[in-house]
Image: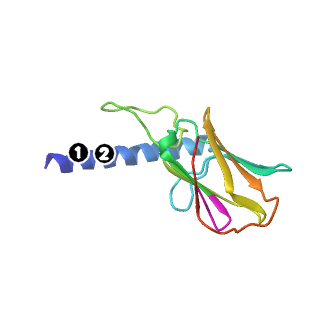
């Protein structure tokens, strides 16, 4: 019985937090939009240089172990979770703009990239992914899991 009550209160707390976030988004809409699956989508820059495509994703407060970067059939996907690490019995928000929980962003990349030469570096809240352009033809379209440094 106690565990059921605890789960009910946790669900009520989560719903209350969601309601507060929706209320504050009405007052000051966030530029970080939820996806159709309910996951939030962090802000990102995508640019091209002579040698590579670069994707920078703003994910401050996310632990490196909570991130994954994959490339599958020309689509680079960043997934992760930003955890709300509040410890305590209750809190009242006066402003709620930071998104927590799971996030996901996908970036279709053009042909001519080297899927075997993808680098991801997470530093100071920014995940920078560099995808080298091909200098010679190679096999494309396989699934690649990228190590984050």
Instruction: Check if mark 1's residue and mark 2's residue have beta carbons within 8 Å.
Output: yes
Q: Which mark is residue 81?
A: none
User: Residue, x 47% and y 42% (percent of image)?
Assistant: 20
User: Residue, x 62% and y 67% (percent of image)?
Assistant: 142
Q: Which residue is mark 2?
A: 10
Does residue 74 show up magenta in the picture? yes
Residue 8 screen position, x and y as percent: 26, 49
User: Residue, x 50% and y 57% (percent of image)?
Assistant: 38
Please tell me how crowded label 2 is: few (under 14), some (14-19), or many (20+) other residues with Cα within 10 Å: few
Q: Which residue is mark 1?
A: 6
Q: Could you tell me which secondary element the residue under label 2 belongs to?
A: helix
Task: Determine if residue 85 is in view.
Answer: yes
Does residue 34 show up magenta in the picture? no
The figure's colour scheme reads rainbow
Q: Is residue 139 left or right of residue 8?
A: right
Please name whichever residue, 105 or 49, is drawn nearer the observer in this view of the structure.
49
Please name whichever residue, 145 or 31, is drawn nearer the observer in this view of the structure.
145
Report the label total.
2
Q: Residue furthest right?
A: 50
* Main secondary structure of the magenta stretch: strand
Residue 7 screen position, x and y as percent: 25, 49
Residue 84 screen position, x and y as percent: 43, 38
Image quadrant in which you'd find residue 25: top right
Q: Is residue 44 left or right of residue 8?
A: right
Image quadrant in which you'd find residue 56: top right
Quarter of the picture containing the C terminus is top right
Q: Residue furthest left?
A: 1
User: Residue, x 35% and y 43% (percent of image)?
Assistant: 13
Q: Could you tell me which secondary element the residue under label 1 belongs to?
A: helix
Please name whichever residue, 127 or 132, is drawn nearer the observer in this view of the structure.
132
- Residues rendered magenta in the picture: 70-76
Give the alpha-carbon distance from disc 1 to disc 2, as whole Å: 6 Å
């Amino acid at each position: 019985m106690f565990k059921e009550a605890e789960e009910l209160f946790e669900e009520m707390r989560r719903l209350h937090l969601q309601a507060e976030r929706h209320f504050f988004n009405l007052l000051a809409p966030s530029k970080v939009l939820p996806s159709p699956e309910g996951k939030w989508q962090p802000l990102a820059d995508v640019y091209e240089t002579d040698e590579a495509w670069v994707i920078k994703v703003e994910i401050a407060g996310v632990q490196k172990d909570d991130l994954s970067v994959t490339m599958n059939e020309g689509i680079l996907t960043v997934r992760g979770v930003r955890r709300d690490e509040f410890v305590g019995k209750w809190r009242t928000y006066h402003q709620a703009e930071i998104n927590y929980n799971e996030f996901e962003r996908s970036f279709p990349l053009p042909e001519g990239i080297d899927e075997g030469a993808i680098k991801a570096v997470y530093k100071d809240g920014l995940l920078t992914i560099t995808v080298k352009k091909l200098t010679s033809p190679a096999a494309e379209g396989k699934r690649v899991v990228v190590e984050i440094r």
